[in-house]
């Protein structure tokens, strides 16, 4: 009976990575941890936490995160090679509960993130946490209430894009400068204009200037 109870208390974890070497490497790090029960494939039926391993927070990664962000009660731990502050809010909006940079991804660090996510908490590297607080503060200064931070004001990625629009760069030039696809830049601008009811790029630049994002 004691053995059954211990198994039931383990956290059901599924690991996702397009790279089988990365996936097997993370599984090898976590396989013998008594706190965890690794599940084969992407078994959503019994998993409570997904560990998603990606190189960067690109459109493909965001699509994956959105998919599992809707699959409650699955919580997501993101193990990422690189992530910019501009991408942080988007990852969190997709349901990511904890972020671990790949260079810091020791077994203990990943297990801690899994445990925090399983308890419904959050776990971010200190610099990303500082960036998040800066985003919230900027949105509040732009007039957002605590529950409306992502609905009012601009995310860091939107700010990066609109600053380059204000400098006269076209979509292709912005995409090259920020290392995004042209489609991503178009989606960022269209989403911002739809959310804030802005008529065109000039209107968006005027809004950003008025709210202090272009200083």
Image: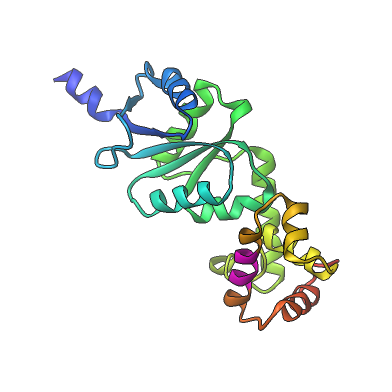
Q: Is residue 186 above or below residue 15?
A: below
Residue 158 on image: x %, y %? 68, 63
Residue 143 position by quadrant: bottom right
| 31 displayed left or right of 189 | left
On whether residue 190 falls in the magenta region, the answer is: yes
Q: Which residue is at the far front? A: 172
Residue 128 vs residue 195: left or right?
right
Note whether 59 is above or below 123 in the view shown: below
Q: Is residue 48 or residue 147 the one in the foreground?
A: 48
Most distant residue in the top direction? 32
Give the residue displayed 45% in from the left and 48% down from the top: 64
In percent of width and height, residue 19 lies at 48, 30
Q: Total marks drawn?
A: 0
Q: The magenta stretch spans which residues?
A: 186-192
Q: Which residue occupies 27% across, 29% down? A: 9
State the residue lying farthest toward the left. 1
Q: Position of residue 179 (x, y in %)?
A: 71, 49
Residue at 58% x, 70% y: name it: 191
Query: Residue 156's x, y, as percent?
Result: 69, 58
Quadrant location, the N terminus: top left
Q: Quadrant of residue 32?
A: top left
The one nearer the camera, 32 or 63, is 63
Considering the whole magenta stretch, tell me its main secondary structure: helix
In the image, is residue 42 above or below residue 197? Answer: above
Q: In which quadrant of the rendered image does the C terminus lie?
A: bottom right
The quarter of the displayed image where residue 144 is located:
bottom right
Nearest the viewer among 215 and 8 is: 215
Model colouring: rainbow
Apparent side of residue 168 relative to residue 151 in the rendered image (left or right): right
**Magenta stretch: includes residue 150:** no
Q: Residue at x 48, y 45 (%)?
A: 97
Question: Hey, which residue is sitting farthest bottom in the picture?
Answer: 199
């Amino acid at each position: 009976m004691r053995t059954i109870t211990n198994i039931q208390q383990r956290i059901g974890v599924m690991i996702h990575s397009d790279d089988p070497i990365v996936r097997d490497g993370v599984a090898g790090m976590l396989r013998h941890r008594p706190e965890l029960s690794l599940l084969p494939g992407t078994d959503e039926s019994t998993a409570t936490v997904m560990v998603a391993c990606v190189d960067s927070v690109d459109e493909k990664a965001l699509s994956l995160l959105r998919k599992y962000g809707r699959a409650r009660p699955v919580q997501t731990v993101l193990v990422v090679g690189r992530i910019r502050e501009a991408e942080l809010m988007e990852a969190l909006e997709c349901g990511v509960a904890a972020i671990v940079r790949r260079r810091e991804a020791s077994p203990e660090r990943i297990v801690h993130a899994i445990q925090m996510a399983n308890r419904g908490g959050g776990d971010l590297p200190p610099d990303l946490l500082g960036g998040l607080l800066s985003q919230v503060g900027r949105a509040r200064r732009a007039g957002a209430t605590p529950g409306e931070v992502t609905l009012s004001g601009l995310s860091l990625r939107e700010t990066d894009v609109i600053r380059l629009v204000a400098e006269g760069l076209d979509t292709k030039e912005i995409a090259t400068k920020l290392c995004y696809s042209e489609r991503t830049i178009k989606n960022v601008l269209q989403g911002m204009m739809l959310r804030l009811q802005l008529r065109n790029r000039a209107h968006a630049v005027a809004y950003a200037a008025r709210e202090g994002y272009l200083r």
